[in-house]
Amino acid sequence: MIDALMRKVAVSALAAVVAVVLVTLALCLLAYAAFWHLALAFGPGTAAALLGGGILALMGLAGLLVWAARAASGARGAPPAPSPPHATAIPTGIPTAQQAAGAAADWVRDNPKSAMLVALGAGTVLGVSPRARRLVDTVLTEALREHSATVR
């Protein structure tokens, strides 16, 4: 039953990705056609400025409409329920890494939207910056060496 559900989720996710890619491709082709049509009439610099300004204006209008719809429907939502207080005392015999992992798991559970934004930001930085990837690799390698030295 779980396998069938996972297949349905995977197919739905794949269909959504394909749809987003096709819509993005269609919008790019429309922008390309509009650019060349405007470039013939006004020149490439003016065409790029008009098209870029038009796209920014449409994005701003879409953002304004979403904001207005949320404000009108009262979708601000109720404030989140206070989370149970975390233990502040450090229990003996539990390594600090396990405490940090537990606290991180609690924070992710309590703040899923923020966690998603943090993960997206971290993924973007690691995807763009080779120096950041090297730093993460170095830190993790050193931590694993220290851990393996203490385990022996």
Image (cartoon, rainbow, N blue to C red):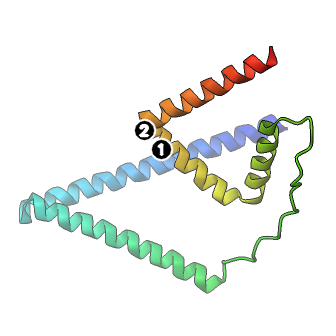
The residue sitting at 27% across, 69% down in the picture is 54
Q: Given contact means CB atoms under 8 Å apart, are the residues at marks 2 and 1 in contact?
A: yes
Read off the residue under disc 2.
Answer: 129
The residue sitting at 25% across, 64% down in the picture is 52
**Residue 125 has which mark?**
1
Furthest-right residue in this view: 92
Q: Residues within 10 Å of mark 1 (few under 14, many from 20)?
A: some
**Residue 31 has which mark?**
none
Q: Quadrant for residue 96, please give it.
A: top right
Residue 49 percent location from the top left of the image: 18, 65
Q: Quadrant for residue 11, please give it.
A: top right
Q: Relative to residue 16, is residue 48 drawn left or right?
A: left
The residue sitting at 66% across, 78% down in the picture is 75
Residue 102 percent location from the top left of the image: 81, 45
In which quadrant will I find the C terminus? Answer: top right
83 lies above or below 71: above
Q: Relative to residue 91, is residue 78 drawn left or right?
A: left
Residue 100 percent location from the top left of the image: 77, 44
Q: Which of these two is toward me, 2 or 48?
A: 48
Q: Which of these two is toward me, 29 or 150?
A: 150
77 lies above or below 126: below
Q: Amino acid at mark 1?
A: Val
Q: Could you tell me which secondary element the residue under label 2 belongs to?
A: loop
Q: Amino acid at mark 2?
A: Ser
Q: How many marks?
A: 2
Q: Quadrant for residue 10, please give it.
A: top right
Furthest-top residue in this view: 152
Q: Relative to residue 70, is residue 20 drawn left or right?
A: left
Residue 90 percent location from the top left of the image: 88, 46
Furthest-bottom residue in this view: 72
Q: Relative to residue 125, is residue 77 drawn left or right?
A: right
The residues tagged by marks 2 and 1 sit, at their Cα atoms, a distance apart of 6 Å
